[in-house]
Image (cartoon, rainbow, N blue to C red):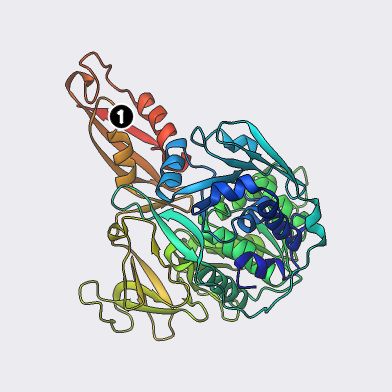
Amino acid sequence: MDLLTLRAAAGGGSIDGHDAASLAAAGFTLLQRSAPLVRALAGRRAAILLPTSPQFLVALAASDGRGAVLVNPLAAPAEIAYQLADANVGAVFTIASLAGRLPRGTVHVLLDDAPTTAVVVHDDGAVQQRVDLGSHFGLGMEGDADTQGRDEECAVVYTSAMAGKPLGAILTHRNLLANARQTVEAAANVKDDHVLAVLPFAHLFGLTVSCMAPLLVGARVTTMARFNPAAAVDAIERLGITEIVGVPSIFAGMLAALERRAESSDATDSTARTMRLNAPALRLCICGGAPLAVELQERWFEATGVELRQGYGLTESSPVALFNNVTQPNHRGTLGVPFPGVEVSIREGSSGRPVAAGLVGEICIRGDTVFRGYVSNGDHGLRVTDGWLHTGDRGAQDADGRVVFHGADKVMFTRNGFNIYPREIERAIAAMPGVQTVSVSATPDDVRENGIHARVVVTSGGTGHASSAAPRPTPDDVTSWCKQHLSAYKIPTTIEVGG
């Protein structure tokens, strides 16, 4: 029971009506029944390119014995190719609609019909093997529920592209299992919970908080592969959802959906036309991934009667380190207090010494959730000194341990809860024929937290990396180039071409 998937499966929970134990067992059965898959993975990592779905747990279990690269389903083909090569991936677990983004010749497993069957596709593109996973229903899950988890790779997530290329952060079973258990305690998760999972499981915030933690206590998880505000509001009310986890733009979107519903109502009763969520079962709303405005917290409470509780973390800390725990009053505008078992210290950037309460410094984290390191180029990422992870984020901590966010020292900003690294976008656009220099910056966006502005300077005559006859790139050309090389959320919203 020292694997994350085994411990989660043994809790007795479910995802979209599928028992977690059956999903995990299906993954182990796949690995046992497919010799070609085992050969492809020999000495190499696996990768998971899937939407938020029950199949994700199947794939994670089938990656047993090796780290699994969690690829964002919004990733562009060039980004996927880079991650697979950098992490030495031997096979990818995916579905038919996403398989076309993989590099030609990649061994992959189609899990569209999992946990019933899986299809292993050979590197020549031919269907090599159809695997019946039906035998998994007879498997049982037993073991020590208190195991700490192996100090071996469980997942690799690409992040921290401050220098222009994302780095693969390595998380162990111990890292992720510790954070899932901490979440259970801080969120007071119980068997009767029903969690609406709208964040990508490829994002550790979504995987740990809205999937693994509920499964540990035997709760239900209902997934939404693609977030739709109106559909989420309907699901919360209709299904008796008790918990939802999201980023600020998700909660803002649901408030907008409630407002539209109230405006379109034909009811003459003023009560029926108010912007209220009819969800008496809802008890917990968790927000993270980006700075949360107090005004949004206030509006959410007015519409739901439930506090919107903010937390803080990053991939390298598995991810959550701070949270406004449910055992305490919610302090709007703060990141909360350290997670159970996590140490948080505010320190001077130069000396690394702790600063006094109330003073601003770098947020540093220590504990079982601090990652192992990066797959490669670790000198370009976040550093760990004497067990302390230096986050590159700034905050101030009061005498009660509560932290207020004061921005980031690292060059990045957020959009829809995802980290945007300007240098990564600049590097991708600079490789476009005809481009001389690029500068990327954030622009205000009330809905998505930030927009992305790219100022592109082209070479005289538009030659650049191409011949002198190369046409001058237009904003539309730049957008098309970005769609091939960057995730959708990284594509600039405004483009200025000059030179």
Q: Quadrant of the N terminus?
A: bottom right
Query: In this image, 446 relative to 30: left or right?
Result: left
**Exactly how many numbered labels are in the figure?**
1
In the image, 158 versus 144, the foreground residue is 144
Q: Is residue 274 above or below residue 435?
A: below
Query: In this image, 406 relative to 39: left or right?
Result: left
Residue found 45% across the figure and 68% down from its top: 317
Task: State the image quarter where residue 26 is shown.
Answer: bottom right
Residue farthest bottom in this picture: 399
In the image, 480 versus 55, the foreground residue is 55
Residue 120 horizontal/vertical position (percent): 65, 41
Task: State the image quarter where residue 473 is shown.
Answer: top left
Residue farthest top in this picture: 469
Q: Is residue 238 above or below residue 4?
A: above
Which amino acid is tagged 1? Answer: Met
Residue farthest left in this picture: 460
Q: Is residue 439 above or below residue 462?
A: below
Callout 1 environment at 10 Å: few (<14), some (14 to 19), or many (20+)?
Answer: some
Residue found 47% across the figure and 76% down from its top: 368
Residue found 44% across the figure and 85% down from its top: 400
Residue 472 horizontal/vertical position (percent): 27, 19
Query: In this image, 163 relative to 289: left or right?
Result: left
Q: Can residue 28 be seen from the camera position used here?
A: yes
Q: Can residue 301 be seen from the camera position used here?
A: no
Residue 43 horizontal/vertical position (percent): 49, 54
In the image, 200 versus 95, the foreground residue is 95
Label 1, on which residue? 432
Residue 476 horizontal/vertical position (percent): 38, 25
Q: Secondary structure at mark 1?
A: loop
Q: Quadrant of the C terminus?
A: top left
